[in-house]
Amino acid sequence: MNIYADNRMLSEGLIGGTVSRHAGDMRQTANQNEVFGKLGIPQDKMLRFHQIHSDKIIRIASDADALSLLSRPAQDADAWIFSCGGWGGVIQTADCVPLFLWDETANVFALAHCGWRGVAAQLPYKTALAMKEAGAQGLIYAWAGPHIQSCCFEVQEDVARQFSVCSVIHKEGKIFVDLNAEISLQLQLAGLTAANLKTPYYCTCGDSENFFSWRRDHIRQNLLSFIYKP
Ligand SMILES: [Zn+2]
């Protein structure tokens, strides 16, 4: 099992990243818990929601918020924002972008499930703004984990027109969307500086050894991404 993560985030005391497919299909909670067990993360502190490719954000600002969430059936949402320690959040992807954000003090941190629909709905932008409302201090940093890259993300015109022209690539009669470019644009509009955004080129669709990919395999198997602050 490999964990893809940003050292800047880890050095701030956050634990998180995207786990390679070797750890199994993360639609199974038991597989998630096995990963958390190996990392020494308390399983009962990791929160889950029901992903719907939306712009809905859940904020956890206190133990009470987390306990309230745990007492109810899984809520519909696609992004987590935490402004308290002791809890973490989980998302699942198989081509969508796991977008990690944290502020300079690492007291406010976020993890968003950004499929193309979520990106088109401005979820990266809205998450960064909501972090500021949640009390983010100083600079905000961002890291986009493994997802389908522009080499493989071919779309039709109806999808392409939902993105800014600079994120759309026309090549040999085909149309591709560069989600990294679109996310970077949104985060810069939200006030982040380009130097604080990292979008490494790990393509879930192109790397079958390490990643599940819905686009490539058409099999429902998901990768795990998580963020946690002890
Ligand atoms: Zn690719």
Image (tube, rainbow, N blue to C red):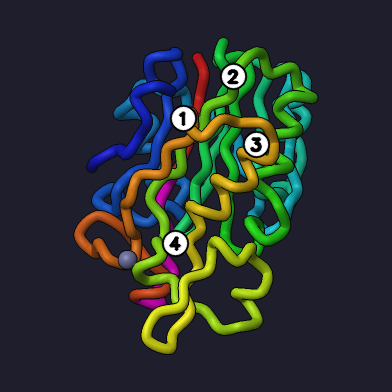
Would you name the residue on which mark 1 appears?
A: 195
Amino acid tagged 4: Asp
For residue 86, which numbered disc appears in the image? none
Whether residue 157 is visible to the viewer of this picture, yes or no, is yes
The dot on residue 80 is 3
Q: Earlier in the sequence, mark 3 or mark 2?
A: 3
Element class at badge 1: helix
Q: What is the spatial separation of the Cα atoms under label 4 and label 2, in whole angstroms? A: 28 Å
**What amino acid is found at the position of numbered circle 1 in the picture?**
Ala
Image point 46% across, 77% down: which residue?
170
Q: CA distance from mark 3 to mark 2?
A: 19 Å
Q: Earlier in the sequence, mark 4 or mark 2?
A: 4
Going by the numbered disc 2, the residue's amino acid type is Leu
Give the labeled residue for mark 4: 95
Q: Tag 3: residue type?
A: Trp
Q: Position of residue 19 (x, y in %)?
A: 34, 43
Question: Would residue 100 be counted in the magenta stretch?
Answer: no
Q: Is 124 situated above or below 216? A: above
Is disc 3 in contact with disc 2, using a CB cutoff of under 8 Å?
no
Image height of 29 relative to 110, above or below: below
Q: Residues within 10 Å of mark 1 (few under 14, many from 20)?
A: few
What residue sits right under mark 2 in the picture?
139
Q: Nearer the viewer, mark 4 or mark 2?
A: 2
The magenta region covers 217-224
Quarter of the image holding residue 34?
A: top left
Q: Main secondary structure of the magenta part?
A: loop
Mark 4 touches mark 2? (CB < 8 Å) = no
